[in-house]
Image (cartoon, helix red, strand yellow):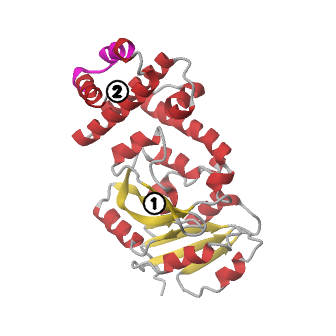
């Protein structure tokens, strides 16, 4: 029976999700950790979703129905406002979680009060359940922060978060539809810690109707806006959109002004390593990643240009570490 003050509030928004919603709900109800409320927002579905939801009689389930289609961000915010758990667990209507996900995330958050956002590794499957890939994410806060400048660092539907942290940040921003999670992370990253569990505890279904497939172009545009804000947080200055695109989407960009791109990455590298208390392992990984990016941009003229720039902008210990990596691998 649902407790008056559940430890976890599970928030799921669904719109016309009849095809997969049953498995998503059953994966939550089958969790080994049972002290939760399950808030399901039916975003004015017109298919069989309402009928399917009505078949579940578990007292922990609370169904909120939108009179009109509000879209995902406003529906999630409605779920958050109606939640009362210490932690918020997210799940999407076409995904499912493994049975021990909540237990392991609650255990980690209880043991690490400085961590406000906790994700897991994710297995991706197709509509038939065939495994496509496994998404491995950085585990520590500093490595997640660094990766946020260049790619996906934490999987939204796998996340468990502290409710007070999310609400104090203003919850999801409706202006960033289809990429609301990345925008929220960009605000939270500076005043709470992030982490990922090194274990696959969530399964994401990839299909043509998913938001990642249907809204890709919108997501890409908004993602650049978010990354510009991240650069501004670290560098205390605005960086032109074209330069951010060039520096963060390297495999897909033709480099016209390589020196400016290298200077931006050098500036980011210097300020990031100064501002964050990196472990030796984290520093080593970031040095290697930085070296790979620079060599990708300008491998031919590395000895002429990059060494000159590194000598000018990087302290000697970091130059030495990068040079060791380059000599070892290239």
Of residues 225 and 245, the one drawn nearer to the viewer in this rendering: 245
In the picture shown, does residue 106 fall above or below 34? above
Per the rendering, the mark at residue 122 is 1
Q: Quadrant of residue 219?
A: top right
Name the residue rendered at 74%, 70% in the picture.
45
Name the residue rendered at 32%, 68% in the picture.
107
Name the residue rendered at 45%, 52% in the picture.
154
Is residue 235 shown in magenta?
A: no
- Residue 281, given in percent of the width and then of the height, sits at 24, 42
User: Dot 1 lies on which element?
Assistant: strand
- Residue 40, given in percent of the width and then of the height, sits at 60, 72
Mark nearer the viewer, 2 or 1: 1
The prevailing secondary structure element of the residues shown in magenta is: helix
Residue count near mark 1 (Cα–Cα under 10 Å), binned few <14, some 14–19, many ≥20:
many
Residue 238: tell me if it is visible: yes
Q: Is residue 324 left or right of residue 130?
A: left
Q: Quadrant of residue 200?
A: bottom left
Residue under label 2: 270
User: Distance of mark 2 from mark 1, alpha carbons?
Assistant: 32 Å
In the picture shown, does residue 27 fall above or below 180? below
Quadrant of the drawing holding the C terminus: top left
Per the rendering, the mark at residue 139 is none
- Residue 285, given in percent of the width and then of the height, sits at 30, 39
- Residue 226, given in percent of the width and then of the height, sits at 55, 39
User: Dot 2 lies on which element?
Assistant: helix
Residue count near mark 2 (Cα–Cα under 10 Å), binned few <14, some 14–19, many ≥20:
some
Counting every numbered tag in the picture gives 2
Do callouts 2 and 1 mark residues in contact (Cβ within 8 Å)?
no
- Magenta range is 305-318
Q: Is tag 2's residue or tag 1's residue first in the polypeptide sequence?
A: 1
Q: Is residue 47 left or right of residue 268?
A: right
Q: Is residue 215 left or right of residue 234?
A: right
């Amino acid at each position: 029976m649902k407790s008056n003050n559940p430890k976890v509030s599970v928030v799921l928004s669904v719109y016309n999700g009849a095809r997969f919603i049953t498995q998503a709900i059953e994966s939550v109800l089958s969790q080994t950790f049972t002290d939760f409320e399950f808030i399901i927002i039916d975003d004015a579905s017109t298919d069989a979703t309402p009928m399917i939801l009505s078949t579940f009689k578990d007292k922990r389930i609370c169904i909120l129905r939108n009179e009109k289609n509000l879209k995902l961000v406003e529906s999630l915010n409605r779920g958050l406002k109606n939640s009362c758990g210490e932690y918020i667990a997210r799940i999407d209507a076409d995904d499912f979680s493994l049975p021990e996900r909540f237990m392991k995330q609650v255990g980690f958050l209880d043991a690490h009060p400085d961590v406000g956002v906790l994700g897991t590794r994710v297995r991706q499957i197709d509509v038939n359940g065939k495994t496509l890939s496994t998404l491995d994410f950085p585990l520590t806060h500093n490595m997640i922060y660094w990766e946020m400048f260049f790619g996906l660092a934490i999987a939204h539907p796998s996340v468990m978060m502290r409710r007070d942290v999310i609400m104090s940040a203003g919850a999801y921003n409706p202006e960033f539809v289809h990429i609301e999670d990345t925008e929220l992370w960009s605000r939270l990253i500076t005043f709470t810690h992030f982490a990922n569990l090194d274990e696959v505890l969530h399964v994401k279904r990839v299909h043509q109707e998913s938001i990642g497939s249907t809204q890709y172009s919108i997501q890409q545009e908004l993602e650049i806006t978010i990354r510009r804000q991240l650069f501004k947080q670290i560098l205390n200055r605005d960086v032109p959109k074209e330069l951010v695109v060039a520096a963060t989407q390297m495999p897909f960009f033709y480099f016209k002004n390589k020196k400016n791109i290298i200077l931006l990455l050098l500036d980011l590298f210097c300020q990031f390593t100064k501002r964050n208390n990196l472990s030796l392992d984290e520093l080593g990984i970031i040095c290697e990643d930085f070296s790979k990016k620079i060599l990708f941009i300008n491998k031919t003229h590395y000895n002429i240009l990059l060494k000159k720039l590194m000598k000018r902008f990087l302290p000697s210990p970091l130059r030495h570490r990068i040079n060791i990596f380059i000599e070892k691998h290239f």
